[in-house]
Image (spheres, rainbow, N blue to C red):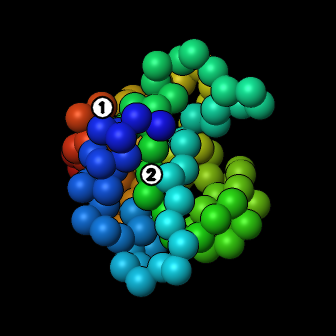
């Protein structure tokens, strides 16, 4: 992931899990809303700030683990995005409400 994307997502999150708001996680992870797929992809949206969330935990624990183990709910909340969808056009339910994320690292309330 480009450093600029990671920096933009960390700035947007203000050092807190974008889902639950915790600021004291032992482990943080950058979660792709539109999955990268096995072997990666050349899709430029994959590493855009609109497609990446800072979540507590890993793929098996914390909010990141919840997303991975409750995929239907995650799609309903916009925490996961279907392969043909543009992450910047799919609202996501975060700790501060339902928002649209942009490719510059910002968020606008829906």
Across and down, in percent, residue 77 comes to 53, 52
**Does residue 14 appear in this view?**
yes
**Does residue 99 appear in this view?**
no
Across and down, in percent, residue 19 comes to 45, 65
Give 80 or 61, whichever is nearer the viewer.
61
Element class at badge 1? loop
Q: Residue furthest bottom?
A: 24
- Neighbourhood count class around disc 2 (C-alpha, 10 Å): few under 14, some 14–19, many 20 upward: many
Q: Is residue 38 left or right of residue 107?
A: right
- Marking on residue 82: none
Q: Is residue 7 above or below residue 70?
A: above
Give 46 or 67, whichever is nearer the viewer.
46
Q: Are marks 2 and 1 in contact (CB under 8 Å)?
A: no
Q: Which residue is mark 1?
A: 103
Q: Looking at the image, which residue is at 54% across and 73% down? A: 27
Q: Is residue 97 left or right of residue 30?
A: left
Give 52 or 27, whichever is nearer the viewer.
27
User: Nearer the N terminus, badge 2 or badge 1?
Assistant: 2
Q: Residue furthest front?
A: 3
Q: So how many labels did they put on this image?
A: 2
Element class at badge 2? strand
Across and down, in percent, residue 68 comes to 71, 56
Position of the C terminus by quadrant: top left
Q: Is residue 55 above or below residue 27?
A: above
Q: Looking at the image, which residue is at 23% across and 35% down? A: 104
CA gap between label 2 and label 1 equals: 12 Å
Across and down, in percent, residue 79 comes to 54, 50
Q: Looking at the image, which residue is at 37% across and 46% down? A: 6
Q: Is residue 5 left or right of residue 57?
A: left
Q: Which residue is mark 2?
A: 53
- Residue 98, image quadrant: bottom left
């Amino acid at each position: 992931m480009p450093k600029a994307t990671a920096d933009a997502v960390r700035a947007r999150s203000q050092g807190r899990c974008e889902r639950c708001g915790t600021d004291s996680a032992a482990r943080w992870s950058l979660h792709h809303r539109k999955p990268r797929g096995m072997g990666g992809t050349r899709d430029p949206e994959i590493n855009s700030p609109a497609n990446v969330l800072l979540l507590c935990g890993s793929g098996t624990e914390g909010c990141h683990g919840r997303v991975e183990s409750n995929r239907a709910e995650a799609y309903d909340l916009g925490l996961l995005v279907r392969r043909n969808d543009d992450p910047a056009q799919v609202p996501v339910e975060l700790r501060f409400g339902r928002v649209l994320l942009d490719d510059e690292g910002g968020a606008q309330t829906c």
